[in-house]
Amino acid sequence: MSAASAGQAGTMERDSVKDQADSYVTDDGRTIGPTVMEMKNITLRFGGVEAIKDISFDIREGEIRAIIGPNGAGKSSMLNVISGFYVPQEGEVWYKGAKRPPMKPYQVAQQGIARTFQNIALFEGMSVLDNVMTGRLTQMKSGLLAQSFWKGAAEREEIENREIAEKVIDFLEIQAIRKTPVARLPYGLKKRVELARALAAEPTILLLDEPMAGMNVEEKEDMSRFILDVNDEFGTTIALIEHDMGVVMDLSDRVVVMDYGRKIGDGSPDEVRNNQEVIDAYLGVAHD
Amino acid sequence: MPEQLAFTIEVFLNGLMAGVLYALVALGFVLIYKASGIFNYAQGVMALFAALTLVGIMEGQVPFGHLINAILGTEVHHFGWHIPAFLAIVLTMVVMIVLAYCVQRFVFRYLVGQEPIILFMATIGLAYFLEGVGDLMWGSEIKTLDVGLPQGINVWIDEFTYNATGYGFFIDNLDIVASIVAAVLVIGLVMFAQYTKQGRAMRAVADDHQAALSVGVSLNFIWILVWSLAGFVALVAGIMWGAKSGVQFSLSLIALKALPVLMLGGFTSIPGAIVGGLIIGVGEKLFEFLIGAPFLGGATENWFAYMLALVFLVFRPQGLFGEKIIERV
């Protein structure tokens, strides 16, 4: 698996020992800000099974944070805790410097957190454009009365949002399938449409659950390029779960490693790559 | 124009008008089913309850009057005021919205994610409950509903067609008004679902609850909205049928007429409800007057729709427009 395929210039040195309140500039000119989201001592149980055991980590503004680990480690569960689909029995979630009270997933979305799903959760009965437009729902403010009347505020808002949705579609190069019913699309394109829908919400934090799953090298290169472009152009903070180590090492600023619900590594890709516990649990060693 | 042809056209037109009203009632079912997977057995009773409330408000009836009198020994029946029709309709709509909120908050919020059959049973319970509450609140005697809709044969059409074709078409004024109102509502609901922001959120909830949550749609709000819309549809249906034959407890049987419409058009399709309604309306009337009466002795109107639905169930169970699941294998 080629490690240099993501289109980045050279390797990046990231010093993970930075004061969490400071901003710093990476080698390629991106600014990474202070902590925007922090998980404090999260414990999640399903009956007798402890899916997440006392995990704490933070995500900084503008960075690309990877969450890796073997299958069953609790990575998707962690993403579900962040996006509000699961409520942890213990621990706190801190967002933008304030403790987040237990809230429903739709309230989390309204706060500026958008996500994609591992097994794709698109609106299968709608076209690509309609799906992307649903991503704009959190940004559309007109009420029931204005919408029923249509002419005036509601129509203007619809046109504005339509323009933004079209920009996102252009950005992800899916114009050709704008009107196709989503159910008919191949897997790789569905994943891209889901990314478009999440992007359309102009999120503060973008959560990606295995965005590269099921893709070949070329498709992974495209997806990596899109993820980097999103982070570069819009400054969107990105947290992603990914199994392809080449992608993880190339894309991410910092990595969290999970295994059986515990955190076994947290730092820059280089630090994590050389962590013995991580090697034993997940990465393995190359044999000659 | 030969009398047989003119007669056929008249029957056809009456069928269309009946069909539009059926389509409206069916839409009430489709809206709720699409958004929450609940088949609302209580839709007909909601129409009855809406009509009862409307009459009660218009005539200034004391709600639960009989009950209060029985318990306290008083003799109150009316407040003594008489509210104009338009205002009464608005107030009744408010009551239906409150009802929608209560149904969602106290019944279906606790049943999220349950099997469809359980949700269906809950609506059966709701139907009996509403029927009982309607009886207790407003009494079960037959009431006349007068919202100022024109009644009787449309003289203008009768004369016009007599002069044009030698055969005067018998078309009821009330039917004309009912079908125009129903058509406007159907178009309005379709446009609402297709183009507005809340309509888009409704379609998202109808498609995938988890995905809808992830794009910031509150499921509870959409469900209350959908039940309110169904309540509005129920109110209109209740007014139309109540004006025609009085507000009585058999009004709740309207719902049964919508079942063949749904089987024809598919449970999840809005255009299906419209087309299905028209087909059933026209088919019913044509069958009765052209085939039923001459050969089978009449009264075939009542069962034709169900027979047609039966045929559809055998050959095309998802209905004309029902969801065919497109799956990439």
Image (spheres, coloured by chain):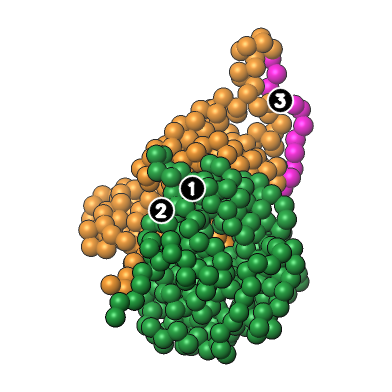
Mark with earlier residue (2, 1): 1
State the residue position of label 2: A260
Residue at image location 71% in from the left, 69% down from the top: A33
Classify residue B99 by image quadrant: top right
Q: Which chain hosts label 2?
A: A
Q: Position of residue B121 (x, y in %)?
A: 39, 38
Q: Is residue A70 left or right of residue B185?
A: left
Give the amino acid at mark 2: Tyr
**Co-location on one chain, circles 3 and 2:** no
Vertical comparison of B252 with A124: above or below: above
Question: What hue represents chain B?
Answer: orange
Q: Position of residue A167 (x, y in %)?
A: 62, 83
State the residue position of label 1: A53
**Co-location on one chain, circles 2 and 1:** yes
Measured Cα–Cα span from mark 2 to mark 1: 8 Å
Residue at image location 31% in from the left, 73% down from the top: B328
State the residue position of label 3: B78
Vertical comparison of B105 with A174: above or below: above
Q: Quadrant of the C terminus of chain A?
A: bottom left
Magenta-drawn segment: B75-89
Marks 2 and 1 in Cβ contact (< 8 Å):
yes
**Is A184 or A280 nearer to us in this picture?**
A280
Q: Position of residue B43 (x, y in %)?
A: 48, 44
Measured Cα–Cα span from mark 3 to mark 2: 70 Å
Residue at image location 28% in from the left, 72% down from the top: B329
Q: Provide the letter of the chain coloured green.
A: A
Residue B311 in view = yes
Could you classify mark 2 by the number of other residues whose Cα lies within 10 Å: few (under 14), some (14-19), or many (20 or more)?
some
